[in-house]
Amino acid sequence: MEKGKNKELEYFRTVSYTSPDSYIKYRRLSEFNVKVSIAEEDFKEEISLNLLNQTAGSQTIYVDNILKKINDSGVNDYADYQSMLKFIRDHELAWKDMDAFYRTLTDFFILELQPDGRISYFNKEPDIPTDYDAPEMAFLNKGIGFLTAEDVEKTTAFNEKYGKYNRDSWDIRTRDIMPEKRFLEMLTKIWGILGEVPMKFTKSAAGEVEDKLYQLKFYIFNALQGESLRNIKLHVNNINNMLLKDQGKPCFENFEIFINSLEYNYPVKHSVAYYVYQWRENLKHLKKEILDNLIGLEKTSRAAYLERLEFGCKEFLKNINVYRSSIDQWLEKYETTEIEIFDPSPFISSELNKVLISDVPKFHDAFEEGFNGDTEAIQHDFYNYHYGETLYEALTFINDKAGRGDSAEKTSLRKKIRSELTVGQLAYFFKLMMDEKLISFKAKTEVYNFIADNFDTSRQGDISSDSVKNKMDSPNPKDMDLVKEKLLHMLQFLKKDSEK
């Protein structure tokens, strides 16, 4: 499988030890951490997929080859991940602080060690402000969020003045650079603990002070690589143990955890962000469990297993009552974007973000001064929408794997489009298109079925083709009036677009 080999190659490239200079291209430690995590999960999935349709003998050979590549990877064991985490925690460092420190060091400062032991520094680009209190930088304080036309204008002016950031404005907007005062505080802290770093690297050409500061960064990089390799090795050993015994029965542990987390279709206690992150994690473990189970099951048993999972998930589809249009309305109202709504960064100031990362309010909270009256509706809508997205993703994965088995039929899972029109209004809208011959069909039944299969409304989830036919054949005057109003609005949009 060429696709599998590519993921395998990408993984071993990511975790293979190289010179310290090769790490410098990663501006953030957290960026590399994410890259390693993604490569690891992709590789685990590919291992399971590659094993599915192999014979017992070829499965053993494949697993042995993977273990050999892990042992030959060249990552040293002395960069211990748990020790690294303890090291960062003990010295009150955080990913975002470390990211910003090294980003600032890379872009702004040149440091020199003086004979008396003091560190002197100067700005690589003296005209570029490094303090976010500077007037030129004030418009960036809102973080990644919604930018007004005025903000965009200021961003363009800033990038024109400091041309090196034309390709880097995203980093600037994330406030991924430290104010000078905070940088010096971090410099003192990191410089003071470098003697405790158990890793020694070859010096680069950056300069004596920078070389010493990068020791900690390289130690963390290498520790992340080593930990990922240990995770993969444990995963492969578990598969190997499973292959050596007659399993025959699927495990439902992670499936039960996944289903139990969807017991309520509204937030009960914690923040919406808490539940969304939990679902993502549960879904990741469920996918791995499904792949591992499929390896140990006979082909004739796979279809029944997947049907059991599909039935369990579909039971919860009736609980979905919020669709994308509602989410877009909240994003528009609060002038924010999808990317920042669950962002825990202290620099995100969106009111919508604050609501989504806050716990469900208690009764008395509603009477507090400054309480957002939209809180309950926002939390319900975002919770239920992502509740549905989680179920759809799980079902899509299950159906995809069902298509792999010789005896399993791949079932179609179609996510319907939500219309704010009623069934009658939607039916009449399509009738107008049919009368104008904008759509072609052999029989009207095709159109009735298409509407029923692909649309739902805010008032009705499942639409029957019979209902569509009845309302199309005998349109309600009120529905006709509303469709007329919508068409007039559409003409106004057309006029605006033509005047641009």
Image (tube, grey):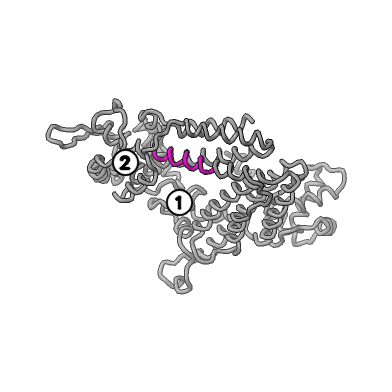
> Among all residues in the image, which is located at the extreme right?
443
Query: In the rendered view, does 136 fall on the left or right side of 153?
Result: left
- Closer to us: 179 or 5: 5
Residue 101's disc number: 2
Q: Residue at x 46, y 48 (%)?
A: 146
Please determine whether, in this image, residue 301 is positioned above or below residue 269: above
The amino acid type, in three-letter code, at marker 1 is Asp
Q: Position of residue 15 (x, y in %)?
A: 46, 34
Label 1: how many Cα within 10 Å (few below 14, some 14–19, many 20+): some
Give the answer, above or below, for where 75 lies relative to 180: above
Across and down, in percent, residue 472 comes to: 82, 56
Report whether 200 appears left or right of 49.
left
Question: Which residues are drawn in magenta?
Answer: 221-235
Q: Which mark is residue 343?
A: 1
Q: Is residue 153 visible?
A: no
Residue situated furthest top in the rendering: 205
* Residue drawn at x 18%, y 33% as measured from the top left: 113
Query: Looking at this view, is 119 or 398 the one in front?
Result: 398
Task: Give the position of the C terminus as an image quadrant.
Answer: top right
